[in-house]
Amino acid sequence: MRVAEVGAAAVNQILGFTPSLLGSLLSSYSKLGLYGNGRSVHSVILKRREWSSNGYLQNHLVNFYAKCEKLWCAHKLFDEISAKNTVTWTALISGYDQCGRCDKALELFSLMNSEDPLSSPNEYTYASVISACAAQNGLVHGRQVHSHALKRGLLTHLMVSNALLSLYMSQERVTEAKLIFQDIREPDEISWNSLISGLSQNGFFRATIEAFQTMRKKGKSVSTFALSSSISAWLQGEFGGRELHGIAIKTGLDVDCFTGSALILMYARTKHMDDGIKVFEILDCKDVASWNALIEGCGESDEGEQGLRVFCSFLESGLKGDEITMTTVLGICTKLVLPEFGKQVHALSSKAGLAGKTRLGNSMIDMYAKCGNIEDGVKIFHNLGKKSIVSWTALIGGFAYHGRVNEVLRLFEEMKINEVIPNRVSYTCALSACAHSGLVDYGMSLFNSMAIEPEEEHYTCMVHLLAGSGEFEKAEELIEMSPRIFKEHLWASFLVACKNSHNWTRGLEAAEKIIKHGLPRDASSLILLSHVFAAAGRWVEVEMLRSEIKQRGVKKEPGCSWIEVGNGVQNFGMDKQTEECRAIAC
């Protein structure tokens, strides 16, 4: 009979107890989380006075309660131990770290060094403390612990190096993390996983693929974490995605949920959703994350209706959606303008106890605003317990979408009063509102006081504001002082303002400036230039531009409209009626 299989009743019947046997039992129970069995062993220990004060058993008890997340019991036993040693301190520090009480783990480490100099930290102690630093973004403390471990000569231990590698990657210190990795003599699977996933998460996509390839050349086994991180890097960096799928098949990881989810999103980004569905179908265990990936993939590959059908199949499977599920489905409802389906998702979220989640609330605000029901979006905003910058921006964008300029500016000022720093989108909404209402002074003041570097859309709003209000000279000055990469689109916006105000003289001057620096890359700008030159009777330029448009094969996309009827959406195009998009209500 294995030690781990000994139950509470069997423990009390065993004769010839020894501290070694009891310690082994506690160790096994802590790994299996068998709290009741471990308490039975503790009761046996308490019946023998000499065992109650046995340091070996005391350490095992502290470790057992800590691993079972009964930290108050572990700490109480810890305080009762008169002769603490390294194992005693490490067991409690590790317990606090694993339970997310990182501040307490660091506090204990400090006490260990100051009050018990005879109990020197070992590699397990340092690994737990460094892990705690990473969890609470404690880069300063992490570096101090790093220095402490270096002085004690413990950096040669793989466990410590791996912990430091994860710490520096989590704090975006990629150079320092790579130096740690280079000093590891024999990197193990954890080392490679930390390096590859860290590079991917920090945006070093090519380096991620290169590290993955190096790992394979060295004959290391491919883990689902390394492969999934490489697939994620491919999604951003456009490397050989199908080759990674081939590796997944060869290693048998294509049926793993974690890897499968990454592959599904990979095929969604490349508009090969049929392949993504095939990946999903062969997964060993279809968990919520894999369903989420499939739904998100359908949405990203412009197959939103299919995504809603997948969501309904997901509900029929008996699984319960999480915040990501509902947020993804609401995004599809917003894109397809399906308010009734969105309301049903809102109801499902409330029943599942998710309605108070900030991220989900933000999606609901956006959905109601863009589906024509801004008032419900306002109610959700006010009911949110914690409002993020995205919450404010979603409602500001909703008011802007409905042309309610006064509400946009009022909410923007209210956001600043609440010490929420505006982001790129909220500035765009506010400046756009100024442009629509002709608030030149307010718009200029807002633009000049931006807390972030203005981007192209902010300059575009200002050009619309100034030129639309007749301030053409100021608009031209703004364009000239803008970054070079923005100028082409800004001059196009200037031309639109000239056309709307029938100021063909200024429009012609701007058009000549644009032509002087080369033809625009944007097809709409070419068409706009053609109209300006035609209005001025400059037919040579018109012919040249029309020839360029023809060579590029530019065609105007036909307009279309759609309405929600029952559980489906009916699309209507200019030249034909498109097929009906069915979406089954949940």
Image (cartoon, helix red, strand yellow):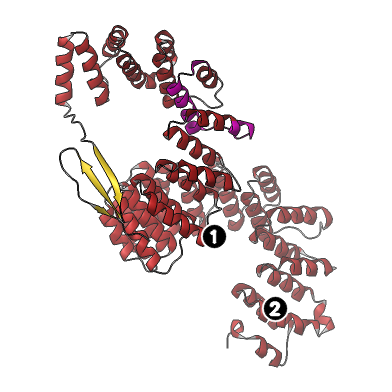
User: Which one is nearer the viewer's eye here, 147 or 59?
Assistant: 59
Residue 393 is tagged as none
User: Percent x, y for residue 112?
Assistant: 78, 57
Label 1 sits on residue: 353
Residue 23 is tagged as 2
Give yes or no for residue 429 being in the magenta stretch: yes
Relative side of 169 to 262, left or right:
right
Q: Quadrant of the N terminus?
A: bottom right
Identify the secondary structure beneath mark 1. Answer: loop
How packed mark 2 is, by other alpha carbons closer than 10 Å (few <14, some 14-19, many 20 or more), is some
User: Percent x, y for residue 80?
Assistant: 83, 69
Residue at image coords 52%, 31%:
407
Identify the secondary structure beneath mark 2. Answer: helix
Magenta segment boundaries in residue numbering: 414-441
Q: Which mark is first along the chain, 1 or 2?
A: 2
Image quadrant of residue 325? bottom left
Mark 2: amino acid: Gly
